[in-house]
Image: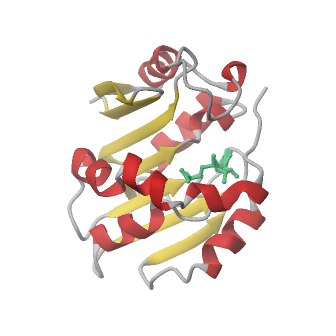
Amino acid sequence: MSHKFNPERAERLVSPERYQEIKPDILLQRLGVPPGKTILDLGCGNGFFTFPAAMGMGEEGMVIAADVSEQMLLLLNRRMPPDNVQVLQVEEVKLDIEDQSVDAVVGIALYHEFKAPLENLAEIKRVLKAEGKVMFMDWDPKADQERGPAKDHRIASAKAIQNLEASGFSIDVQENYVEDIWLLIAHLSS
Ligand SMILES: C[S@@+](CC[C@H](N)C(=O)[O-])C[C@H]1O[C@@H](n2cnc3c(N)ncnc32)[C@H](O)[C@@H]1O
């Protein structure tokens, strides 16, 4: 069963402490997608990663900021995204995005909210270009720290890897980015 993020808590997602800890610019570097490309920030919330990604992709590039929650997108819009951000409300699985049109899909603190991860991964695969990459970051169920979603709402990275591989992705990076948050980067297997 998935549990969706409560928009009343959105402010904490864009706190200076979180930027300091997660460092979206480092994530962009690790992803290795150069300026001029298109990133889909899936489950963008109020834009924690959207804004740094838009800066990184530059005027020639684009970020699609997509979320199921109208409320989260309203909060994102209030933060005045730049012109190279396209804000898109999506359905739980279906994305109104063309086949093979994005260079990377990034999902931060999203994976554990998927109701049907294999269906989401199939849809992500559909919109990715052949050289496309995915990056997921999420809470480790085995972590000791008392923060983040309840342990039984979290998904182990091993499970996400299993689903990614079953969906036709090869894993490039698998690590705990900080102690209680895992990071996966993968590309489409040829
Ligand atoms: C914990 S918030 C994280 C937001 C943002 N990625 C961040 O790190 O600040 C998870 C977000 O994913 C969205 N979400 C959940 N399931 C989704 C889905 N299937 N497709 C798109 N967005 C989804 C929620 O509405 C929420 O805004």
- Which residue is at 41% across, 53% downward? 100
| Closest to the observer, 120 or 70 | 70
- In the image, residue 125 above or below residue 139: below
Query: Is residue 90 in view from this perspective?
Result: no
Q: Is residue 27 left or right of residue 69?
A: left
Picture quarter containing residue 182?
top left
In the rendered image, which quarter is residue 170 located in? top left
Q: Residue at x 73, y 32 (%)?
A: 115
| Count of numbered labels shown in the rendering | 0
Could you tell me residue 31's position as x and y percent?
A: 27, 46
Place of residue 138 in the rendered image (x, y in percent of width and height, measured from the top left): 51, 34
Q: Quadrant of the C terminus?
A: top left
Is residue 180 visible in the rendered structure shown here? yes
Its colouring scheme is: secondary structure
Image location of residue 84, percent across then percent down: 41, 79
Quadrant occupied by the N terminus:
top right
Residue 79, percent from left and from top? 58, 79
Q: Is residue 93 left or right of residue 19?
A: right
- Residue 40 higher or lower than 161, as above or below: below
Left/right of residue 110 with respect to residue 166 in the rendered view:
right
Residue at the location (20% across, 61% down)?
A: 34
Depth order, front residue of 14/131: 14
Name the residue at 71% across, 73% down. Answer: 74
For residue 45, above or below residue 136: below
